[in-house]
Amino acid sequence: DAKTTQPPSMDCAEGRAANLPCNHSTISGNEYVYWYRQIHSQGPQYIIHGLKNNETNEMASLIITEDRKSSTLILPHATLRDTAVYYCIVRVAGVSDYKLSFGAGTTVTVRA
Amino acid sequence: GAGVSQSPSNKVTEKGKDVELRCDPISGHTALYWYRQSLGQGLEFLIYFQGNSAPDKSGLPSDRFSAERTGGSVSTLTIQRTQQEDSAVYLCASSLLAGGGETQYFGPGTRLLVL
């Protein structure tokens, strides 16, 4: 998605926290930050989303800066199964923005 | 509960044949979407259903592609007279309601190979 920028790749150690950054400096007040991932040969998997508050679920935590211009997805204890391409996108909270579009994302490799 | 399911998971067909791809959305989800993803490429939107109606078919690549949804549930994507360029992963997603604030949940995809 042209509205976000992510590093192309990152490595992390199994069992450690993985912190994935995303910049969305032109985000509007009614746009959510969404994270998906796609494990090789599988369909995209929803991870988490947020508007302005930090969010946590069973998969991850999402930290959004106060100015909302960037965010970090945190996988608290990375496992080998977390190796995937992670996509950060912004979506307008309205009826019209239903076409998902992923950019290049961050290829995360979890190493034993 | 069960997620989005798609069948078949893989399909190999000969050029010129018709194929049908099926999607079972999450129960109760009113919106359903079809995308395709070519090797190493991003998502390409094909069509969106709200209930049994398709308000947006703008992404269908040609008139060889059609889709329907019945009973507000199962959807079928049909490709007639398949071509080699139709080879891709066809993904289905569903959401409780339509719109940008609604989370779309994806199925595992159908990998189509046209020989």
Image: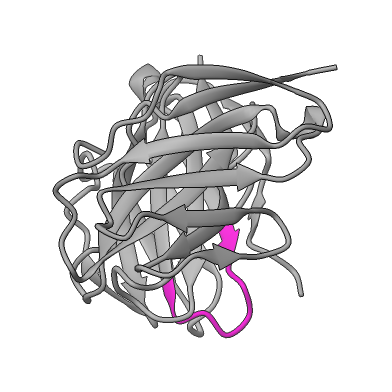
How far across and how far down the image is residue A38, in percent?
57, 36
Q: Is residue A72 above or below residue B87?
A: below
Q: Is residue B81 above or below residue B67?
A: above
Q: Residue at x 60, y 56 (%)?
A: A61
Q: Is residue A4 above or below residue B46?
A: above
How far across and how far down the image is residue A21, in percent?
44, 36
Would residue A6 be seen by someone viewing this image from the given angle? Answer: yes
Q: Return the residue found at the far front.
A: A66
How far across and how far down the image is residue B30, in percent?
45, 81
Indicate yes or no whether the magenta region holds residue B27: yes
* A16 vs B95, nearest the viewer: A16
Give the overall secondary structure of the magenta segment: loop
How far across and how far down the image is residue A106, in percent?
47, 26
Indicate yes or no whether the magenta region holds residue A103: no
B8 to the left or right of A28: right
Q: Residue at x 52, y 55 (%)?
A: A62
A30 to the left or right of A11: left
The region drawn magenta spans B23-31
Q: Is residue A72 above or below residue B96?
A: above
Rendering colour mode: one colour
Q: Residue at x 22, y 64 (%)?
A: A97
